[in-house]
Structures are given as structure tokens and as C-alpha cells.
């Protein structure tokens, strides 16, 4: 069989092995639909059906394992309402998880599912949780696609470094969800994080106070440390100390400071 039609058919059978019976029953129709030689489709229909089902089961298991690593809390919330069959058929069957962009695309789609699976009272908290897990992968992608750092007059966040605000201490919420523990006491507590690429393609999340969030929002490389201090009512020493504390945690801050 020759690509791309054969590859599409095989991929379809791996995620929907029940179609194998149709391939056997009417190979001519399948051949016409996919633009394949009838003889090749007949050979596919003559292969061992148990082997195909085994391969499909392994494919399904590997996809769930990948999602459990990539979006553990989001998937846990989905599984509280939906069975694995529904989750797989609606979102995982055709997902491509071999690239980081594919993982992010799946994460975006899972957002719709987790919202369906969430009671209105918990929606804000779960939306934060999903956004946090998605951001971890977006930071990795930005770091991988890092462009050469331009010369700047003042401090700027390094490639991939992202500052985000949530309505809850979302890293704690995530741990509670994974432990199947309640998180009612964590509602309505605005928190700020800086997410930074780490070694071995990891991402580290550091909770920061609102004042540091305000400083980092203004670190775009266009203003010197004295100018930042004057604009924010901070001393030059306090600005440099704050940036040094981030650097010591592994957060890259470029430019002159």
C-alpha cells in the first residue's frame, strides 16, 4: 500500500478497530473511498483481526498515558464525569501527541471537555487549573523556538519566561485535584506566578508577590533599572535584588541590570 491513503486508513483502523469488519465485508468500497488499489485493501482485510485489536488497544493506552503526563489534573477532572471511551472518541482518537504543538492543540480541546464536566460553582477554579497545565507546555514551546536575544537597554524576561495571574493558588489546587481532595478553601485567592524553562525541557513555576508581578510586567528591555525604579517607586537596589532573587531560582532575566 502506498501513502498517504494507506496511512490514513491504517490510522483510522487503529483508533476505530470496529471498521475492520467493514474492510473485510466491502473492500471495493473502502478502496474507492481512500483511493487505494482493491488488492491492497483485500490484503489488509485478510490480516489477523485479533492483532489489529491488540495494536489498537496499545495505541489507546499509550495516548492516555501521554495525556496523564501532560495534563494530569485536567484529565482527572474529565474522568470524574466522562468515561474513557467518551474521552477517547471525542478528543484522543485523532490527536497527534508526537509533537509539542500537537500536545498543546489537544490541551486546548480538552478545555472544552473539562468545562462540560464541571459544575458552575467550580468553573473558575477548574478553568484556572486547565490554563495552568496548558501554560506549562506553551512555555516549553516558546523556549524551544527562542530567537536570538536582541540588545536591550534594561532588564527583560528571557525566552519562554511567562508571568501569569490566577484566581486561586493554582499549583496547590492541582495537587488537591490529583490527591482527590477538596479545594473549597483555596477559592478567590488571587495569586501570581512566573513560569520559566528549566533544564531537560522542564518548566518551573514560582509563586511571586503582586509587587514583583508589577515589576516584571514592566521589564520589557526598554527601560534601565533606574528608570524602572523611578516609575514604580522603588530603589535601584530593590529592583536589582528582586531580579537577582529570580535569577537564583533559575529564571532568566536578560539585558543590562
Image (cartoon, helix red, strand yellow):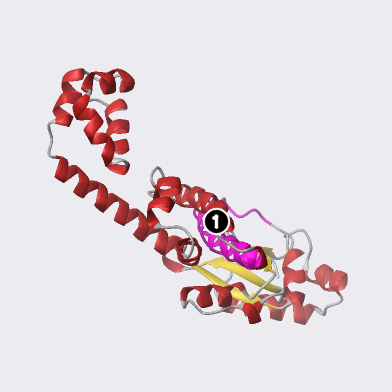
Q: Is residue 105 above or below residue 47?
A: below
The C terminus: image quadrant: bottom right
- Residue 163: within the magenta? no
Is most of the magenta stretch helix, strand or loop? Answer: helix
The N terminus: image quadrant: top left
Q: Is residue 167 above or below residue 159?
A: below
Q: Is residue 207 above or below residue 119?
A: below
The front one of 199 and 150 is 199
Q: Going by the image, does 11 lie left or right of 53?
A: right
The front one of 118 and 149 is 118
The front one of 140 and 177 is 177
The residue located at (29%, 31%) in the rendering is 9
Expressed as whole percent of the image width and height from the top left, the position of residue 182 reads 56, 79
Residue 161 seen: no
- The number of numbered badges drawn on the structure is 1
Q: Quadrant of residue 187?
A: bottom right
Q: Residues within 10 Å of mark 1 (few under 14, many from 20)?
A: some
- Residue 124: within the magenta? yes
The residue located at (70%, 58%) in the rendering is 152
Q: Quadrant of residue 154?
A: bottom right
Q: Quadrant of residue 219?
A: bottom right
Residue 223 seen: yes
Q: Going by the image, does 147 lie left or right of 12?
A: right
The residue located at (66%, 63%) in the rendering is 120
Q: Going by the image, does 233 lie left or right of 117?
A: right
Expressed as whole percent of the image width and height from the top left, the position of residue 46 reads 12, 31
Mark 1, residue position: 138
Mark 1: secondary structure: helix
The part of the chain drawn in magenta is: 122-151
The residue located at (59%, 57%) in the rendering is 115
Amino acid at each position: 500500500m502506498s501513502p498517504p491513503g494507506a496511512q490514513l486508513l491504517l490510522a483510522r483502523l487503529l483508533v476505530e478497530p470496529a471498521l475492520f469488519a467493514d474492510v473485510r465485508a466491502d473492500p471495493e468500497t473502502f478502496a474507492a473511498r481512500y483511493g487505494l488499489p482493491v488488492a491492497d485493501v483485500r490484503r489488509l482485510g485478510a490480516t489477523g483481526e485479533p492483532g489489529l485489536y491488540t495494536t489498537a488497544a496499545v495505541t489507546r493506552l499509550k495516548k492516555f498515558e501521554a495525556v496523564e503526563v501532560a495534563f494530569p489534573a485536567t484529565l482527572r477532572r474529565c474522568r470524574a464525569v466522562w468515561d474513557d471511551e467518551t474521552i477517547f472518541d471525542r478528543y484522543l482518537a485523532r490527536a497527534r501527541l508526537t509533537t509539542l504543538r500537537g500536545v498543546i492543540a489537544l490541551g486546548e480541546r480538552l478545555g472544552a471537555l473539562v468545562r462540560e464536566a464541571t459544575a458552575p460553582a467550580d468553573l473558575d477554579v477548574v478553568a484556572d487549573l486547565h490554563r495552568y497545565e496548558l501554560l506549562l507546555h506553551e512555555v516549553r514551546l516558546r523556549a524551544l523556538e527562542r530567537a536570538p536575544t536582541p540588545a536591550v537597554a534594561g532588564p527583560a524576561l528571557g525566552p519562554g519566561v511567562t508571568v501569569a495571574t490566577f484566581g486561586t493558588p493554582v499549583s496547590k489546587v492541582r495537587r488537591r485535584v490529583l490527591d482527590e481532595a477538596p479545594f473549597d478553601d483555596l477559592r478567590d485567592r488571587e495569586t501570581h506566578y512566573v513560569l520559566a524553562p528549566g533544564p531537560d525541557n522542564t518548566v518551573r513555576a514560582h509563586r511571586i508577590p503582586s509587587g514583583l508581578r508589577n515589576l516584571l510586567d514592566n521589564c520589557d528591555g526598554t527601560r534601565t533599572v533606574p528608570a524602572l525604579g523611578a516609575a514604580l517607586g522603588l530603589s535601584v537596589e530593590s529592583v536589582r535584588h528582586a531580579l537577582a532573587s529570580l535569577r537564583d531560582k533559575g529564571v532568566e532575566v536578560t539585558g543590562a541590570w
